[in-house]
Amino acid sequence: MDKLFTEKLGQSELASREKFLSSFYGFVVGDALGVPYEFRYRGTFQVSGMARYGTWNQPAGTWSDDTSMTLALMENLSEEGTWRTLMEKFVAFRDEGAYTPFQKAFDVGDTCAQAILRFELGFSPLEAGSTDETANGNGALMRIFPLAFSLYEETDFYRRSDVVRECTRLTHGHLRSQVASVLYCELIRNLLQGMALGEAMQETGKNFVHYYNGSTDLMSEYENHFERDLIEGKQNKAAPNSTAYVVDTFSAALWCLQNTNSYEAAMLTAVNLGGDTDTTAAVTGALAGILYGFEAIPENWRKTLQNDQLLKTISQRFCDTVLSQRI
């Protein structure tokens, strides 16, 4: 691991940073792997590594709005900012190319763009995200994982959940999107405690059933993700949809992890599902990074990432200010 992150650290803080950087670079690499293939149909291509051009005509290693908005969240957490200052960072991302590889945003999801516009028009940050059922894309899920680290020491599920749900509401106000973010962060939390994937999913499912059992809508969308037979591999589940719908993205990430046994295989499987390739791979990558560790991320993929200095600067500050002695 880069000396930038490891010099003069105690064992506890070193472990904390290693876990975060494994998840962070696992996420960014997944995003960059998927960018050239976004919107392409499953079966019409075969990815084997970092590629250039493609859908967005970008150099190899280019990451998307998934990483840009995640970097904005990380910087906001490092500065102890408010939801308003985070929304202002999202405006800077859209208008000024802040947090992007080349100082220009080449892709902003429709629901996120609408929320940013609503904020500019005077809506409060927590009212900016649409509550419409059709606004359940993955634009909040794709940027939420740093909260699992910043909230790690918070032992009360309700308090953790409230923060995650509020952050989701900035762009996605429907409860289905909020709960996807909560489930994702809780799954990461369980993995950070050293649980295997199956055990982490079971524990996440217990919380889900306990806290959301009163919602028929949520149960119908998420309950099957935590069936014991599925977790234990006793069901031969076909490859899921890999659209931008938040439930599809969450399902696809779990399926990729359950059906592979390495970081590299999980990433290639995620991208080759087609559809919303960058977000599927990014969401999968944050989990796979924790499961397999930093060294499992192919070095040639990491070294291809564009504007790595920005990634290092923001992630180092996040480690210095948010993670110190937390995990």
Image (spheres, grey):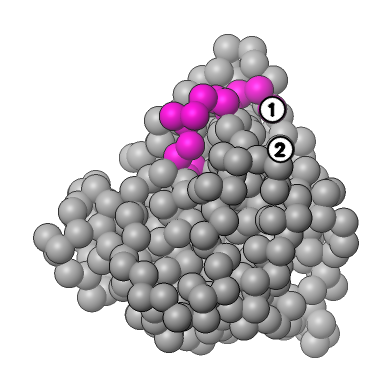
Question: Could you say which disc has been placed on residue 166 in the image?
Answer: 2
Type of amino acid at the residue the image marks with label 2: Glu
Residue drawn at point x = 25 percent, y = 58 percent: 274
Main SS of the magenta segment? loop
Pointer 2 local density, CA inside 10 Å: few below 14, some 14–19, many at least 20: some
Crowding around mark 1 (Cα neighbors within 10 Å: few <14, some 14 to 19, many 20+) is many
Is residue 79 found left or right of 47 in the rendered image? right
Q: Which residues are magenta?
A: 126-139
Dividing the picture into quadrants, the one containing residue 325 is bottom right
In this view of the protein, which residue sits in the foreground, 86 or 289?
Answer: 289
The residue labelled by disc 1 is: 126
Q: Earlier in the sequence, mark 1 or mark 2?
A: 1
What's the amino acid at mark 1? Answer: Leu
* Residue visible at 60% across and 41% down in the picture: 216
Residue 55 position within the rendered picture, expressed as x and y whole percent measured from the top left? 21, 49
Residue 224 image position (x, y, % from top left): 52, 60
Q: What percent of the width, then of the height, locates residue 154?
A: 86, 59
Q: Look at the image and say whether residue 132 sits in the magenta stretch.
A: yes
* CB within 8 Å, label 1 to label 2: yes
**Magenta region includes residue 154:** no
Q: Secondary structure at mark 2?
A: helix
